[in-house]
Amino acid sequence: MAKVRKAVIPIAGLGTRFLPQAKAIPKEMIPLVDKPVVQNVVERVVDAGIDQIIFVTSPHKKAIKNHFDRNFDLEAKLLSSGKKEELQQIRKISKLAEFIYVEQKEARGNGDAILTAEKVVGDEPFFVTYPDEILDASPSLGSQLIKEYNRSGTIILAAIRSDDPDAADKYGYAAGREIQKGILDVEKVVEKPGKGNTPSDYVLVGGYIFTPDIFPALRKAGKKVEEGKELVWADGMNVALSEGKHARAVMIKDFKYYDCGSKIGYLQAVVEMALKDKRLGSEFRTYLKNLRLE
């Protein structure tokens, strides 16, 4: 069985929920303390053993490529200034993984983004995750998914239980039969089922391990998408399941979920990660305690 060593991260979206900031600066580059959201995601992917990151991008996302490329002028300036720690941090970014960029011609949904990466992925299993969702887990999200993939060889979907009362209107759910505690044999994926219609408590967020079977399934699903509508990964997933392919949803253990695609989720992530920061945490905690909140 082939090793999971590639990750696809779609970044071609326009980030309209973060306008006007996202007009010039991609939402993926919004900082969590001093690191862009997308770097936080990449570091967690690399922690799972992934060594090749495939960004599905657009012409407007040059800032992300610049961030993960080397900046020789900046490095020379830091070196001449004796800022060795800062130089090490900057050089480390470009060495995190091999970065590949493929352009999505138009934003036609995350299913189309996955198809755009097909030639680079080839016939290998691969991890898909998003630059605005951080699932901070130990072991990492990717590690937990890859472990189950290595055991079963099937498509693996990350799942959590959510206490968000609006979760059924925001996220997809897995339907199926629980074969052991925390693992669901998936029969169908239901996108945003709405309150009272959830098929299980397996809320699908964070990422997936796909086998190459997803590509022909997505193409078949794409033929049924109406003009002006988006192709989402769940459409292809359901085609694959209907054709006898297997998938499991796995409850992620020991995690904290940050939805950085929403403003409130992003602000929560900033506060909590600042509190965890070794340099800033103590001072920031004191500041928060001294706030007089009405």
Image: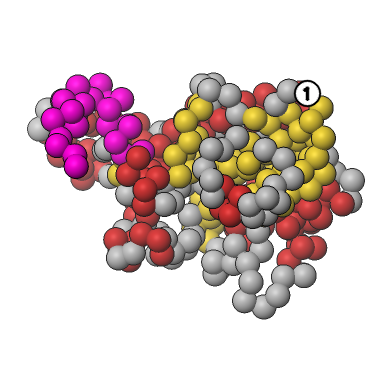
In the displayed image of the protein, which residue is found farthest to the right? 244
Specify whether residue 248 is in view. yes
99 relative position to 155: left or right: left
Residue 101: % across, % down: 50, 53
Residue 111: % across, % down: 65, 57
Residue 31: % across, % down: 30, 44
**Amino acid type, residue under disc 1 in the picture:** Gln
259 within the magenta span: no
Image quarter hosting the C terminus: top left
Task: Name the residue at 26% across, 38% down.
Answer: 34
Task: Name the residue at 32% across, 32% down.
Answer: 273
Label 1's element? strand
In the displayed image of the protein, which residue is found farthest to the bottom? 227
Residue 268: % across, % down: 35, 40
Specify whether residue 209 is in view. no
Task: Name the residue at 41% across, 52% down.
Answer: 262
278 within the magenta span: yes
In the displayed image of the protein, which residue is found farthest to the front? 294
Q: Which residues are magenta?
A: 269-294
8 relative position to 147: left or right: left
Res 109 → quadrant:
bottom right
Res 283 → quadrant:
top left
Res 41 → quadrant:
top left
Q: Mark 1 = which residue?
A: 180
